[in-house]
Every structure is written in structure tokens, then in C-alpha cells.
């Protein structure tokens, strides 16, 4: 019963097989290989546009490199104040951006609004040379609270960014989960809605170590490859990174995995909802649940071997909050075991 | 006949099997897993000391993070002026060090000397506050010219560094090849000789994407883990990085692979030496050869399908230079095919 | 009637005379001059301890260099969320710190509390390697809202920092104004209360361009001089920077100037208090006033030639806020003219 | 007899008077004042073009901010390997550029050539993503060896830069001295010859602390003001920086001062040339001399109270080298006293 994170899961068999299949003979290093070429073609098909896709090994690298490419060192990024980039990446965005700031905005369910972005820009402009001016906004899809921006919400954020001259970055560490929830096309959720750059996650959804930065606006990609190299994120044996991502995208594996994870989360939520001792803090739209519970109950669950994180407090909720994350590999048995425990513990 | 680089080779079967063996069940992420613990124990055994080992995915990350941990942003690193860190990492060391400088020194065979280090420090100190002061020296073992520092040379460099208050970093992207050449112990070639930090390479010698930074002086490791995180180099599914390194270190695989690569290089060198049209620019001590050849000969080799890089010019040698790199996977047939071609082309 | 800022004032005559007096003959550059030596002696006398004082030309330089000296690039600084360092220095602290973060805390009157600092540290430690850990706290004295931390408040902040292993930095752009308000000694308000480093302002209080960073803990000053040099903040003709600061500190000029500015602010406040159309948002303890007024009144004041800034909105106050700043050079006539205008406009 | 540096000289009286003249009343801070406006007009007149001029307090700030504006963090600057930016600014350029590298080139007399620049760019391009690519070249005028690039030389460097897509920066800490030597117009020596950005020095030639960055290509100036602010180099009381530069430029003061300094250097050179014990290492074209002398002679000069620096060694010259710098304030008596001493010591 490991609900600590989707990154405690193993590698999806199909992805490991793709690595094995790639393992013969010498090929050109640093991305000049057929699998990397194939990945580009696949991504263009799936996103229905002439994009640029650059694989890296971690989500933090994807986000930090993407933002550094969009924002100058004296600029800023607007984001949710509990965004992963703001709280959980050890300062990577600031490091890669050369000191640019994150200007953070409150949001009860993890979703920031166009009005907040406009207000942040207006305030910065009032401050003139003394204030850093936002040059990008970053949203997380699915959010850090397991909610999902609707297509309309993304579209309105995209429009606000365009009005104010900001680029729009989407941290899609759980992009597949959001897409599975919304049921729209990848194109609709990204460039058609005004997203300029996507951090496209795969590791949490079955890969070994594989993420990608996708630029829908090719002009904005200038410099990315040099930044990736100087960030130490250009793999010499790139074929093994591209092999993972190809397998992930081929035959809809990524969406099948995401749907499995989302289903497990819904099963958990449905099981917890009736319990008087548990309260879901947010609607469960992807593969994360946030549950308020009495301290003793949480202790009992942990004592019984359930693995999960305690989360930050929420205004108006006196009880502690726990976070439960499901993955493509979560089984019905694990969910049901946890629910049985939660009902009795 | 791919002699372009040792990173064009595939993954060594034993390492891929270790990845597969690690692929079951959930485990704690970010390094709190049994394989990472095992890696630490293995490395302590092999290096015979109480070290700290931190895996990362690329050699550039290993070098840049190691140097950033040793040197303050207003300091400097002394190194060979064609060192990989100086010319081939896209500025990664400067980026990770926060702008600290590389002070580069000439060296005909890639090996810098204690006297050069002392002179660089003396000059910096003369310049006072206006000059950056070296806080570390970095040497590459095996060097960028395929030569290997002797134990005595490393020991003398270590002593010079200690005298001047510098840390000594060894870029060991091809550490195994150097060790195989020297036949000494890993401890003798590192901390016993005064090396403080080792970038320990595995990718070029059979891994998929796995290097490690080894601190022999634990106090100097402070901050490394935070720097790795903010560099985006902390893998969430760390078990797959540690699995590679464990397999690499177990049962002497790393040295067997290195010996195979070195042997192939020697076979190449022995075959080329008698050819009147070829001249080995440096003694072949590891798995790289640098060969002066007439332009037409080089063109003919390329036309016949041999893969290699043209290298920088060398004073006193009018002909162009090519670099040939062998790997654990290079076969005698490949070598002999190349030699046959070189003899006739 | 210029109440826009204390930096719109001219240079205090005694300071200009000191510059003129320094202007003869050749002297050693970069701080190896007698005036810089004298400044060190003066500062040690006045602060009654064996400190290190380093002059720079701007307050932003003082703050950013001080924080960069205290905090590693992967660390963080805890401060008020409208602190000058957080909002008005164009990202200078992040730049000089090499990307370290400011973790900001709300505070209705600009004063943060020990409990907030402790909570911020506790949260960071919970987050482990993924969160940046605060290594310093920074407080502004007098604050951005014209209030002044009491001696007890500073002492308690100092104790909290010490408990948690944080350094305590004081942004004293208006340190003299705070000191004049409190009537304590410079030592009591700084190192005796637990302040490690002070950005000691003079420009806003009569200098041409002169601030200083004072380290009460000499060990913490290591590297400052190299950082100042690489920040471009080491003046070659340092005598002219030190001359300003010597004149400022001699004969109590700095406190006379601060008292004059504070008095003018009090006179303004006393005149505005009875007006039904004006409300002082904060107690006036130094030389800044924040006044809520109807929009028409503000327009009328501006139309009549009064110079001031509109400020950020305040919860619970529907009217706009203006900021009025007095300086050593503000005359009673200017204050009375403004008051007359405010009463009638 | 202080020949240590031109920055040991005092402030030129006319410049100090300009500061005094500026010292009345309140004026808008941060550059929105009439003197800064006047400075812009003056500079446009003198350089005969529609430039942007931004004052800062130090030469290191001018150079580092100029280069940071021209070069991206993953780029590089080509310069002479003993350039002030490379050796004497404590790493400031790398710091402000966010880690971009200086690629340094040898030059016996301090003057680099178009061929060297082209070769450096060609090599970087050969290295592809692994090598940093130069985005600017920086030349020092007058050079670090007291020589002066001719108009033709600058023009050819400008053409080479344009061919290769590099910006051309001129470190003009002693620009006035070079101009006085060449007798051409400021426009001819800068934008007409292909210079994009000039670090325009005044401090060494009579100012208190005043330099300026002049962009002849306004598009290239984007971001400079934000960089200056976050570098802590935006003076609040900017009028005192602009007042210095206005006085410097008005009525030809800057060229009168430079001619006086150059004349003193020539007088020194003419006096030293006949001495058998002294050898001028370079032609004296500005206000610096480099003289090889026997060790005992140097000791005797120092013992007699002459102030100067010992310089780096020069190939083929066994004796130590000293550097002598004259300034606008150097008197004939000082020169003659030194010469008398040199003849007899």
C-alpha cells in the first residue's frame, strides 16, 4: 500500500522492453540517433503541430530549463504559491534562470486565474525598474492539489498571457492524468489553448527517467539545447531516453497508464467519501487525493504499513491532511486494502 | 568501425540485467532505496575508505556539481586548457559554480604539473582582490590525450594542492581505463594520492547513463545533495541509477570492460605504428588514440565507413589529427578492418 | 513639497565639505587609504565592538552583498513579503546570492515575528532536500511601513535565528531614523540584540552615495571583499566614499539628520491626524507616513504640486494610500504648506 | 612620485565644482533628473549619433553590465588573455553574464586581431553544442600595454565581428587617452568603426566615481537598465553621477585631461629611453609605460619613494618589468624627479 508518490512505482514493462530493444550496436551520441528522430515525429503526430521536443532525465530539469529559456535573468515567472517549481525543486528554477524570481499567487485548489496574472503584471509595471517584470506564467496540469484546469480555464490563461506579453508554461509532470480526465486532445490542452511550452512528464507514469520539454513555438526554443548541455542534461547515450519516450507515446500507452492511475484514485476516493472520519479536501480529478483525517487514524494507517505523506495544513480544516497518490501500477487490491484499513483503523 | 567515441557503444548486458532485476514493486524514491545503500557499501569496500558516493546521470553533471561544491563563486579552478571541463561541457562548470573561473594551463600531453599550479596560485595572490584565487585544481584521468598520470604525478599534484590550500578534483570519465593501465588500487590512485573528489565515470564504459561523484573527504561534501537537487540531477527513481553502478562495480565488471577497451586501443596502435602514413601523437595508455595522417588518407577512411573525429591541430605536426576511441564493446574484427583500411586506403 | 522619497534630497553640506577636504594629492586606491582606516575606527567606537565595515555606493548593493555573504546559493532568506529586498531591488538579492530564494512572510505593519521565522524553518526542514532551507532572516529597520522594531522585538528575532542556525541581517537604509526613535545605542540595536550584519544607510540621510555593510561577526565577513569586487562595487577612489561616511558618523551628524527627518514626519502626522479625510495607516515612528485619503483629495494635492507616491492597497481600507517621506532637509514650511493644502484641497 | 595608477589621483576641480553646483533642492531620483537628461544630449552631440548612455560608478560595473547585456549565459566573449576583464575584475564579467565564458587570445602588445576572432568562432562552431559560442568580442582602448588600436585595426575588428554575428565591445577605461593619441573623432573610433558598446571611462581621468556605458545600437541596450538595477548600480541620487559626466564632457575637459596625462607619459618615456638600464617594452601611445629594469634599480626607485607596480614577465626579457601610469594631475616636476632618480639610482 504505497501511496507516497507515483514515482515509487517501477518502470512499465513496455518501456523497459523498448530500452532493451534499443540496446544493440553503436549509434551516434547526444541525440543524433534514429530513436530521437522518431520521437520528434511521434510527438508532432500526437500534438498535431510542428513542435520541438527535447528529452531530459528529470521533471525538475524539464521545468527549470523550460523557464530559463522563456525568462531573462532580470524577469519573473508568475505561479501558484505552492507550485512544485516554487516549493519542491530546491530552487532549481531560480538557478537555471540565473536569479529570476517566482512571483507566487494564492489559489485554494491550485488553480491560478487570469485576473491574478494581470494584477501581478500591473503591479510590476507600476514598480518600474525597481520591480521584476513577469515574462512567463507557469501552471501545473494536473495541479498540486489533484485538480485539473478545464480547457476554458487554460484558454483564458493563455489569452491573458498573450495580452500581457507573457509566455505560458505548463508543468505537465502529470499531463497524461489531466488529459485522461478531460478527454480532449493533446493539442487542445496545449498550443490550441495558448500554451507555449510543456514540461511533458513520463517518469511518474511509467518511465524509468524520462521527461521532455516541448516547444510549440519554435522561436521560443532558441538556446534550449545549449542550456540543456550546460545544465548537464544532455545524455550521451540519448537513444535510451528517446526509447522510453517513444514507447510511452506509441499505441497510447501513456494514456492507458494515466487512466489506470486515475481510476485507482477514483476508487480510493469513492471508498473514502462515505467514511465519517475522512474528508476529501479537493475534488479528485487526476491521481492524487488530499484527505483530512484525525491524527489517530493517520497514525493507525501508518502503523499498519500504509505509505503516504502528511501535507500542509488547510485553512478552516483543523485536522491534518494526508496526500495519497496512485500510479499506473496501483492495483485494486492495494486500494481495497487501504480502504478496509481506513474503515476500521 | 565506430571509433567516434566510447559513448556510441550500447549498454553492457550485465548492467541492463541489473536494471531489469531492480524493476519490481514500489520503493522509496530519491535515493532512500536499498540499491543506493548497497552502492555506498560497495564503493567503500572498493575504495577502502569511508567515502560518500552520489550518483548522477551524466559526466558533465558530475564534474560541474563536484567543482561547484569545492569552489566558491568568486574562486577559480586550475586545469589543463583543453580539459573537457574547459572546452566540451558548454560552460557547465561556470554555470554550476555561479560564475567562478577556470584558469587554464598548457600541457602538451594533457598532464598539468605541480609547478604550474603553484605558479597560478602565486600569480592570483599577487593580484589580490582583483584576481580570482584558485580554490581547486582539476585533472583528467585518463587525460584528454589518452595519456595517464602516473601515481607519482598524482601524488605530487595532491601535495602541491594541499600546500596551497586547494582541493584536488579528478575527472574520471575514463577512470577505469586509467586504473587498468596503472594496475594500482582505486584507493592508491585517489585519496591516498591526495584526490579529494572523483567524478567516477561509468557511461563510457558500459552503463546506460550513470556517473557518480565520490567525496573522500566527507566534510567537503556538504551541500552537494542540495546542489544536485537544484541542478535537476536527483532522479526520483534512483534505484535505476544505483542498479547500474552496483552492477558496474560488482565482480570487477568495470575493470574487465576497461581492460577490453584498452586492449582494443593497443591493438589499433600496434597496427598503426608501422604505417609510414600514420603517426601516433601521444603514447596510447588508455582507450584513445590520436593519429596524424595525410588528409587524403583520412578522407578515404571516412569514405569507407570508418567513424571518428578530426581533432585540434598540434604544433609541429603539419598533418591533420584524428581521434580514435575504443570501448568495452569494440571487437578485434572492427580493429582489424580499420587497420586493413588504413594500410591500403 | 517633495515627499516622494528621502533620496530626492541633496547632499548634506558637511558631507560635501568632507569630500572637498579629501580632494588633494594622490592616495592609494581601493580602500588602502587613511580615510577608510579612519572610518573603521569610527565605526568601532560608535558600535562599541570590533566590527568590519565595508563601504559601497548603493543600498541595494549593501543588502545584496550582505545576504550573498551569509547565504549559500541553495539556501534562502526569510523576510517580510513587502520587504525592499523582496519587491524593490529588481531581483538583486537573488542575483548576488546566485539564485537563493527569498521566503516571504506577511506582516501588517512590516514587522515579522520569531514564530513566523521558526515556522518557515520548520516547514523547510520537513521538505528535506526538495525545499530550500533558510540560512538567514532579514528585517528592515525602520520598516517599509515607517514602523520601528522595538529592542525586545529585535532581541527575540535574534534569539529565534540563533536557535535555528540562521544569521540575522538588518536592512538599515533608515537605521538612523529607527535609532533616533528608540533612543538606544547603536550597539544595543544591533549586535547586542543578535544582529549579525547591518546594511548601514547614509544616502537617504544626507550622503551623496554611501552605504556600508557592517559585520559584527568577523568570521561571517569572509568573502565579502571578493564579492564586492566582482559585483563592481569596489570604488577605485575609495577615499570619497569613506570621506562621506566619516563625516556622517562624526559629531553625531547622522543622528541629528535623522532626528530632523523624524521630527518633520511627526509634524506632518500631527497635522494630518485631525483631518477627517485622512487616516494614518500605521503609527509614525520614523520618517515615513502612509495615509489613506479620498481619490479626489490625492488628485488635488498632486495638482497643487505636492510630490509623493501612491502605495499598495491595504485590506479593510477602501481608499487609496499615499506615502509621504521626509528627510533631514525637509523644512517646517514645506510641511505646513502641505498641511494647509491637505486641509483645504 | 605616484605612478601606481591614474586612479590614485584626486578629482579634477571642474568636476568637483559640478557636484557642488548640483547640490541644491530636491530632484527626482534614479535618473529622472535634468542633469541626466543633459548628459544624454551632450553624449549624442559629441558622438554624433542617437546613442543611449547609462552612468555607473565603476569601470568593472560598466564592463560587466555591458557584456551581460550583449551575451547570453551560455555564450562567450573573445578577448585578450591579459585583458582587464579577464584578469583584474575578480570574475565580474562571468558573474554578471550568468556564467558565460571569456575565451582569451594571446597578443604581445595587447591588441587582438580579426583573424584570431574568426578562428575562435570557427573552433567553437566546430565543437557544436559542446563548446560555448562567442557572441561578442571585447577590446581595450587604450590597451593594457599602453598601446592604442589604430582606426584601421578597430574597423577591421568591427568587420570581423559583423561577419561572424558578434557584438563588439570596447573597454574604454582610458578611451580619452586613446582618442587624444589618435586625434580622430569619438564617432570615428566607435560606432563608425563598428563598435556596438563602449565602456566610457572618466574616473581614471579626473572624475570622482563615474563611468558610462554607451550603446550605439539602441536595440542592443534592451535590458541594460534592469541589469544595472539588479546589479545595485542604479544610484538613487543620480544627479551627482551625471553632474560629473556632464562636466567631464563639457568644453573638452576630458580631452584636455587625457592630453595632459599622455604628455606626462611621453615625457617619462623620452627621459627613460636613453638610459642604458631601462627598456620600454611597448611604444608609449597613451598614459602607461612598461619598463624593463634591473632588480636593484627598481628597489632603489622604490626606496626613494617612487610608487608603481611590478608587472608580469615578458618572454625574451630577463629583467623584471614595472608599470608607470600618469594622470591628468601628474606634474612635470614629478616626472623629472623620477627621471633624475632613474638616472642615478
Image (tube, coloured by chain):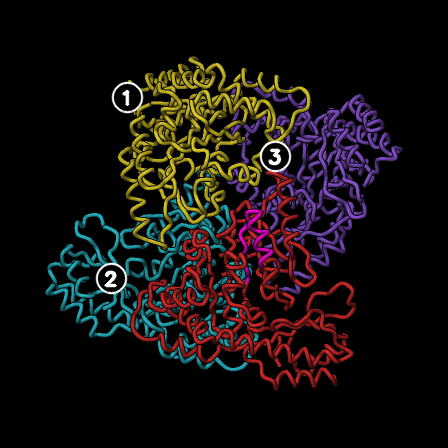
Chain colours: A cyan, B red, C yellow, D purple
Point out residue B237 in the picture as x, y percentages from the top left corner: 37, 67
**Residues at marks 1 and 2 on the same chain:** no
Within-10-Å neighbours for mark 3: few <14, some 14–19, many 20+: many
The residue pinned by badge 2 equals A308
The residue pinned by badge 1 equals C276
Nearest to the observer: residue A282 or residue D313: D313
As displayed, is residue C314 above or below residue B182?
A: above
Report whether residue A195 is seen: no
Residue at mark 3: chain: D
SS at mark 1 in the image:
loop
Q: CA distance from mark 1 to mark 2?
A: 57 Å
Nearest to the observer: residue C152 or residue B181: B181
Q: CA distance from mark 3 to mark 1?
A: 50 Å
Q: CA distance from mark 2 to mark 3?
A: 55 Å
The residue pinned by badge 3 equals D58
Within-10-Å neighbours for mark 2: few <14, some 14–19, many 20+: some
**Residues at marks 2 and 3 on the same chain:** no
Residue range corresponding to the magenta coloring: B155-171
Within-10-Å neighbours for mark 1: few <14, some 14–19, many 20+: few
SS at mark 2 in the image:
loop
Q: Is residue C35 magenta?
A: no
Point out residue B45 in the picture as x, y percentages from the top left corner: 42, 67
Point out residue B178 in the picture as x, y percentages from the top left corner: 57, 69
Amino acid at each position: 500500500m504505497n501511496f507516497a508518490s507515483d514515482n515509487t512505482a517501477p518502470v512499465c514493462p513496455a518501456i523497459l522492453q523498448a530500452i532493451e530493444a534499443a540496446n544493440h550496436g553503436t549509434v551516434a551520441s547526444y541525440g543524433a540517433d534514429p530513436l530521437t528522430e522518431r520521437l520528434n515525429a511521434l510527438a508532432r503526430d500526437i500534438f498535431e503541430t510542428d513542435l520541438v521536443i527535447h528529452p531530459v532525465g528529470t521533471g525538475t530539469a524539464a521545468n527549470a530549463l523550460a523557464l530559463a529559456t522563456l525568462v531573462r535573468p532580470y524577469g519573473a515567472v508568475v505561479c501558484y504559491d505552492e507550485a512544485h517549481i516554487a516549493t519542491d525543486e530546491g530552487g532549481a528554477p531560480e538557478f537555471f534562470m540565473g536569479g529570476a524570481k517566482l512571483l507566487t499567487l494564492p489559489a485554494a485548489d491550485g488553480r491560478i486565474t487570469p485576473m491574478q496574472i494581470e494584477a501581478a503584471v500591473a503591479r510590476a509595471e507600476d514598480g518600474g525598474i525597481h520591480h521584476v517584470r513577469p515574462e512567463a506564467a507557469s501552471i501545473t496540469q494536473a495541479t498540486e492539489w489533484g485538480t485539473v484546469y478545464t480547457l476554458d480555464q487554460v484558454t483564458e490563461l493563455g489569452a491573458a498571457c498573450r495580452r500581457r506579453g507573457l509566455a505560458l508554461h505548463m508543468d505537465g509532470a502529470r499531463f497524461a492524468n489531466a488529459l485522461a480526465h478531460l478527454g480532449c486532445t493533446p493539442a487542445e490542452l496545449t498550443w490550441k489553448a495558448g500554451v507555449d511550452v510543456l514540461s511533458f512528464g513520463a517518469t511518474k507514469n511509467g518511465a524509468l527517467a524520462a521527461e521532455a520539454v516541448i516547444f510549440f513555438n519554435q522561436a521560443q526554443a532558441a538556446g534550449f539545447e545549449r542550456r540543456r548541455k550546460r545544465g548537464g542534461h544532455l545524455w550521451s547515450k540519448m537513444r535510451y531516453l528517446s526509447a522510453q519516450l517513444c514507447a510511452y507515446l506509441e499505441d497510447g500507452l501513456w494514456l492507458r497508464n494515466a487512466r489506470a492511475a486515475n481510476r485507482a484514485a477514483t476508487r480510493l476516493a469513492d471508498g473514502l467519501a462515505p467514511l465519517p472520519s475522512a474528508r476529501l479536501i479537493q475534488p479528485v480529478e487526476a491521481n492524487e487525493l488530499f484527505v483530512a483525517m484525525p491524527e489517530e487514524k493517520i497514525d493507525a494507517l501508518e502503523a499498519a504499513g500504509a505509505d503516504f505523506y502528511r501535507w500542509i495544513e488547510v485553512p478552516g480544516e483543523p485536522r491534518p491532511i494526508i496526500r495519497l497518490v496512485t500510479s499506473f501500477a496501483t492495483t485494486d487490491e492495494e486500494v481495497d486494502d487501504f480502504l478496509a484499513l481506513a474503515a476500521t483503523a
